[in-house]
Image (spheres, rainbow, N blue to C red):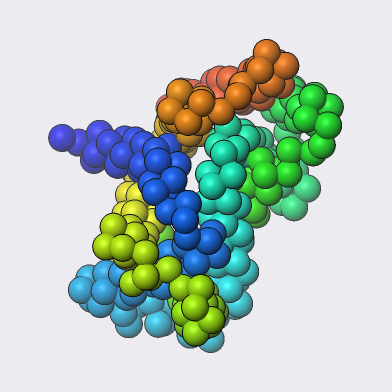
Amino acid sequence: MSVGSRGVGCAIGACVVWGVFPVYWKQLVHVTSLQVIGHRFVWSFLLMVVIVLVSGRAREFRDALTGSWRSAVFPITGFLIGLNWYTFIWAVESDVIVEASLGYFITPLVNVGLGVVVLRETLRPAQWLAVGLALAGVIYLTIVYGAIPIIALTLAFSFGVYGLLKKTALLGATHSLTAETAAMFVPATVYLVWAESTGDGSFAHSGTLTDVLLLSTGPVTVVPLLLFGWAVQRIRLSLMGLVQYIAPTLQFVVGVAIYHEPFTSQQLIGYSLVWIALVVLTVEGMMTHRLRMAARTG
């Protein structure tokens, strides 16, 4: 199997895991979202420490952060990914998985917008069209809901800004995830100890299955992130863009088909505008990539 094929397989595997995450978090609805996030950071960090040590990259990791401005970035990215995780888990517990999936459908368009606002990138006409369609969809859904779809927007913008900061930090997937979880390890541990001292702790008090699921938040967080990070470096960005839609699509299906969340014809109109925007953005990106490749080889 070629490196490219393995890269596609890893990317698909990561997105499938993310897509069925609601089923996993549903098993922990009796645990508060903050405690789940606390365990997720603690066990993810400890697992990352093991990975870094076993791979012999501890010194490389230390040198990458020592005396570097990057060390100031990762507490921020750690907070942002924590906010993203908390919002998604809260959405699962509150039976609004469908709206959560919308957040991850919107994320690529938020990335485009951040590129314009922060990086001063220039959009091509089709990209402007995609952003306009997505904005129209969000506005329409706001009117339908009678309120701003705050869950979807929080997920989209927290992940979008998170990605932007990680891009500027220029650190590999293993090192960046280790740094982010390290930054949140102490506050997460302090919170879990406090919850235990007040009698609200769930670990070792809610049955063996709950304990196993909480301990497993480490590997179920780390493995797909590392697979995705490995894949990003080995397959075309345009292909990665298509693969990324697997996760929110599966989340949407899980919400509607498994947990029977309502999805009205009015919602369909708003979501369709976002889906059309994604099609426009993806097709335009693929065409632009092909034209650039042709120009280089021509």
With 123 as the anchor, is 240 left or right in this view? Answer: left
Residue situated in front as seen by the camera: 84 or 36: 36
Which of these two is toward me, 32 or 290?
32
Left-right relation of 123 to 288: right
In the image, residue 257 sits, relative to residue 234, either above or below, namely above
Residue 112, horizontal then vertical, whole percent? 67, 39
Front residue of 105 and 70: 105
Q: Position of residue 185 (x, y in %)?
A: 47, 77
Residue 134 location in percent, x, y?
72, 27
Q: Is residue 26 left or right of residue 230?
A: right
Q: Is residue 217 visible?
A: yes
How many badges with numbers are in the image? 0
- Which residue is painted at 69% across and 21% down in the image? 267
155 w.r.t. 284: above or below: below
In the rendered view, does 3 fall on the left or right side of 178? left
Where is 19 relative to 277, above or below? below
Q: Going 67% across and 44% down the picture, which residue do you hit?
A: 151
Give the vertical position of 102 relative to 267 (above or below): below
Q: Quadrant of the N terminus?
A: top left
Residue at image position (47%, 52%) is: 29
Residue furthest to the top in view is: 265
- Between 264 and 104, the residue placed more toward the observer is 264
| Residue 241 in view here | no
Question: In the displayed image of the protein, which residue is found farthest to the left?
Answer: 1
Q: For residue 68, which quarter of the picture?
A: bottom right
| Residue at image location 73% in from the left, 33% down from the top | 123
